[in-house]
Image: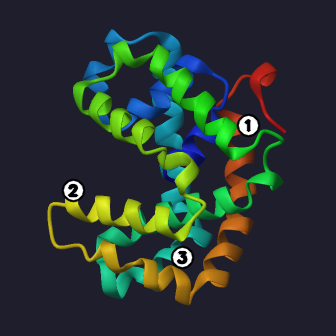
Amino acid sequence: MNFLAHFYLTRGLEEITAGNFIADFVRSSQQHIFSAEINKGIEIHRSIDRFTDEHEIVRQSKQRLYEKYHKYATVIVDVYYDHFLAVNWENYSDVPLAQFSYETYSLLRKQHHVFPSEAQRLFHFMSAYDWLYSYQSMEGIQRALHGLSRRARFNSGMENAIADLKKYYSEFEKEFMLFFPQLQEHINSFLLPPEKSYN
């Protein structure tokens, strides 16, 4: 899952969401410098990724893209799924997406001092260009894919993946709608304490 889904799953939990955000920039050997709640967020992020990568429904989505994009199919599906969360947002939250995005940036800004330098740079662009809100539009997804393509080590072709989203839109949306409740249940049941669990 990409940023929007990750933040949705730990919404309102400041340090846990901060850990969720910085997880990809922190090695296990570095975790001792962070608070218990930030470390919990890091572990939740990694559990989300494992659950997603190993799930049969997500594999179906990735298989549709693998011939063209190979290992980058995983990254592309993550972005697609954020799009479907954004366009179906009212099914998951009573808080409008614009408000959720603003509140998430504000929450993360309070923890900015603990972010590794790469995470600080990423957060600057994310908040400045309102990535979370932009995922609901095709233009926003195109920008996200283009940015990922520029940062890829190899020629990924990800900037062209908007065409695949349009071509197989209903298939990807159906797979997201089947998968996401299972991911929610996984996080609620196994990783968040009962008093913080979301139904």
Question: In this figure, which residue is indicated by the disc labeled 3?
Answer: 61
For the residues labelled 1 and 2, the Cα–Cα distance comes to 33 Å
Q: Is residue 46 left or right of residue 55?
A: left
Question: In this figure, which residue is indicated by the disc labeled 2?
Answer: 151
- Give SS at disc 1: helix
The residue at the point 35 percent across, 40 percent down is 125
Quadrant position of residue 103: top right
Q: Is residue 157 left or right of residue 106?
A: left
- Give SS at disc 3: helix
- Give SS at disc 2: helix
Q: Amino acid at mark 2?
A: Arg
For the residues labelled 2 and 3, the Cα–Cα distance comes to 23 Å
| Vertical comparison of 55 with 61: above or below | above
How far across and how far down the image is residue 161, in percent? 40, 78
Quadrant position of residue 128: top left
Question: In this figure, which residue is indicated by the disc labeled 1?
Answer: 188
How far across and how far down the image is residue 186, in percent? 69, 45
How far across and how far down the image is residue 61, in percent? 54, 76
Tag shown at residue 150: none
Q: How packed is label 3: few (under 14 Cα within 10 Å), some, or many (20 or more)?
A: many
Q: Amino acid at mark 3?
A: Ser
